[in-house]
Image (cartoon, rainbow, N blue to C red):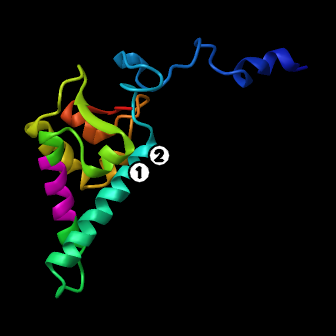
Amino acid sequence: MIDRRDVGSWLEGSGAGPRQYPGQRLGRPAAGPGSVGRPGRRLVALALDWYLCWALAAWLAPQWNQHGLVTLALLLLLNVLLVGAAGHTPGHWVTGLQVQTLDGRPAGFARAVVRSLLLCLLIPPVVFDPDQRGLHDRAADTILVRTR
């Protein structure tokens, strides 16, 4: 006869010890400045950047019925220029996020180009690892962290 002790081991979890928080393996704090930016902040930042680029596309090209590609091109340009120069886009700035290398330095333009191109493909940002780094961040060797 099977009793509770026989099935209890797999019901109780792996027993691998305390659960790690995102960024712990990378030496980042659990919360506050320097911690990994969580998905909620990331989505708000992306939405703010997208709507800013959408408004610019509508203003720059009002005669076009579809602003989708213009908006995407502006988002790419915005990310390359501002992440490369300042480490954050307007959406990142509003939500208190910054793109950095794994050792805390600014991302720079080369990493910003790789990250931005993959960001515009949409799939890399939604596939992420236990440290909540999307494939675009892993390819560019960057991390999105909180600044406040």
In the picture of the structure, the residue carrying the numbered disc 1 is 43
Question: Is 56 within the magenta?
Answer: no
Q: Is residue 17 left or right of residue 123?
A: right
Q: Main secondary structure of the magenta part?
A: helix
- Depth check: 87 or 123 in front? 87
Residue 3, by quadrant, is: top right
Say the numbered circle drawn on residue 130: none
Quick one: SS at disc 2?
helix
How far from the left and from the top, in percent, is residue 80? 14, 48
> How many residues crowd mark 2 within 10 Å: few (<14), some (14–19), many (20+)?
few
Quarter the C terminus occupies: top left
In the picture of the structure, the residue carrying the numbered disc 2 is 40
Q: Is residue 106 left or right of residue 145?
A: left
Q: Residue furthest top?
A: 17
Q: Residue furthest right?
A: 1
How far from the left and from the top, in percent, is residue 45? 36, 50
Q: Which residues are magenta?
A: 72-81
Q: Residue furthest left?
A: 110
State the separation of the CA atoms marked 1 and 2.
5 Å
- Residue at 22% across, 48% down: 118
Residue 85, by quadrant, is: top left
- Residue at 16% across, 46% down: 82
Quarter the N terminus occupies: top right
How far from the left and from the top, in percent, is residue 75? 21, 59
Quick one: SS at disc 1?
helix
How far from the left and from the top, in percent, is residue 18? 59, 14
Callout 1 amino acid: Leu
